Image: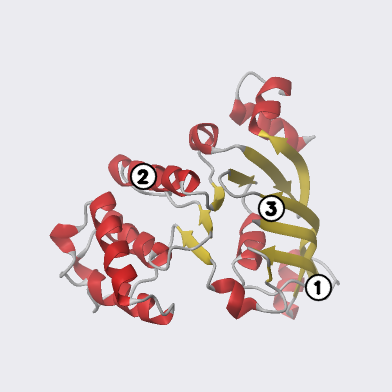
Amino acid sequence: MIKVSHLRKEFDLSRQQQKELNTADKKALAVNDISFECHPGKVYSLLGPNGAGKTTTLRMLSTILTPSAGSIEIAGIDAVKYPQEARKKIGFLTGSTGLYARLTPIEIIDYFADLYQVPTKAREERKKYLFQLLNMEDFLQKRIGKLSTGMKQKVSICRTMIHNPDVVIFDEPTSGLDVITAENIIKLIRDCKEQGKTVIFSSHIMSEVDLLCDDLAIIHKGSLKYQGSMTDFRQHMEASNLTEEFIRIVQR
């Protein structure tokens, strides 16, 4: 479970940034007083246009960024006070792979398994499951620098999931991917849900949101503009489709 209460994030502005933004303010408010809960066995979608504060929020949940104020509870752990303990419960996948080009997939995945102190038997079982799910057997011994974008994303998925986290955060994971690789990620998200994991899913592709999500929130200019179940969202929307309804909410 994820429980977020009154989350806030400010960034210091350099003089150059103040000039570019035409402001005398020394700080920029990226996230302002956000609260929500995500429950096990459900997919929670956090939506927002570029610059809305969505990725900043996800990075705070994953303990990459420290909040300026507010609290985050990850699987019963205070993630602000004990980020290292919370991190053991989290898998965080983005559209950016950030993999070392000279290593092989096996070397990278084993490195992260060591980092998370995954026991040998559990590691081998987990690797077998992920390699079969993502159809990776043909390139496990190739250097990362020789792999396609889709192959690299599959390695990133394994890196994210090797420790079998209770909470999984997907930040636009299918961005720029081919249809087959994107479908593998969709299947993984469904598997996570069936396994009772807490899943946060962020995407600009509304068909994926419609397909996967149980609950959603829409963030714009750092604040929540909508929060509720996907069922209620569909039943009460005023526009003719999900994309138009999303646009209507952020522009009102």
Q: Quadrant of residue 128?
A: bottom left
The answer for how far apart the CA atoms under marks 2 and 1 are is 38 Å
Where is mark 1, residue-wise? 27
Q: Which residue is mark 3?
A: 52
Please provide percent x and percent y for residue 213. 56, 38
Q: Amino acid at mark 2?
A: Ala
Neighbor class of circle 1 (other Cα within 10 Å; few <14, some 14-19, many 20+) is some
Q: Which residue is mark 2?
A: 182
Q: Residue at x 24, y 78 (%)?
A: 103
Other residues around mark 2 within 10 Å, as few (<14) / some (14–19) / many (≥20) = some
Q: Residue at x 25, y 77 (%)?
A: 107
Q: Give the amino acid at mark 3.
A: Ala
The mark closer to the camera, 2 or 3, is 2
Q: Nearer the viewer, mark 2 or mark 1?
A: 2
Q: Is residue 238 visible?
A: no
Q: Secondary structure at mark 2?
A: helix
The correct choice, above or below, for 223 with respect to 251 in the image is below
Res. 218 in view: yes
Q: Earlier in the sequence, mark 1 or mark 3?
A: 1
Left or right of 89? Residue 25 is right
Task: Determine the residue located farthest toward the front in the rendered image.
Answer: 121
Residue at image position (53%, 52%) is 197
Which quadrant would the N terminus be assigned to in this image? bottom right
Residue 43 placement (x, y as % from top left): 56, 44
**Front-lying residue, 224 or 36:** 36
Q: Where, quadrant-wise, is the C terminus in this rendering?
A: top right
Q: Amino acid at mark 1?
A: Lys
Which SS class for mark 1? strand
Q: Position of residue 18 (x, y in %)?
A: 76, 72
Query: Dividing the picture into quarters, in which one does residue 71 lie?
Result: bottom right
Label 2 to label 3: alpha-carbon separation: 24 Å
Q: Measuring 50% from the left and 45% from the top, which residue is drawn there?
A: 193
